[in-house]
Amino acid sequence: MVEIRPFRREDTAGVVALWQACGLTRPWNDPYKDIERKLTEQPELFLVGERDGQVLASAMIGFDGHRGWVYYLAVAPGHQRLRLGRRLMERAEQLLIERGCPKINLLVRSTNSGVLAFYEKLGYARDDAVPLGKRLIPDN
């Protein structure tokens, strides 16, 4: 059985390897810096799925008082379709509800049809909004 628990510092290498295996990393985002940044804000909302010391899944969750967000939801390629992603999202939703969060948002690349289908099965729908971004602190 995979245990879902809060992230620990010793999970860092396993989490980064997971993100890389799932294609979540990008050259302009340093995953180690993303982890360090998360550990300064709501570290209890950074979850991993672990079995026998191996990180098999992750979810980075945040709540700003208005909306909840989920980032870096990842399940190891050999463990996908075993409901682990669903379990992580259920835990994320519960943690946000406990904080009084009225709505959850997440970002999925428009070309990732498999992940879009996964979230649609969980009841998520596309919002009529366009995400905009601006890098304030470059990682490179």
Image: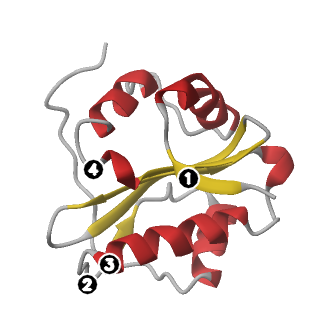
Write down the residue under mark 4: 42
User: Which is more N-terminal, label 1 or label 3?
Assistant: 1
Residue 81 location, quadrant: bottom right
For residue 138, above or below residue 98 = above
Q: Earlier in the sequence, mark 2 or mark 4?
A: 4
Comparing 135 with 11, the one in front is 11
Amino acid, disc 2: Pro
Q: Which residue is mark 2?
A: 102
In this view, the residue farthest toward the right is 78
Amino acid marked by disc 3 = Glu
Which is closer to the viewer, label 2 or label 4?
4
Residue count near mark 4 (Cα–Cα under 10 Å), binned few <14, some 14–19, many ≥20: few
45 is higher (above) or lower (below) than 8: below
Mark 4–mark 1 CB contact (< 8 Å): no
Determine the CA span between mark 4 and mark 3: 14 Å
Residue at (65% x, 35% y) in the render: 18
- Image spot of residue 24 (x, y percent): 55, 39
Q: Which mark is residue 98?
A: 3
First in sequence, mark 1 or 2: give its number. 1
Q: Earlier in the sequence, mark 4 or mark 3?
A: 4
Q: 122 or 126: which is nearer to us? A: 122
How far is disc 1 from disc 2 in space, using C-alphas?
Answer: 23 Å
Residue at 34%, 80% (x, y): give it: 97
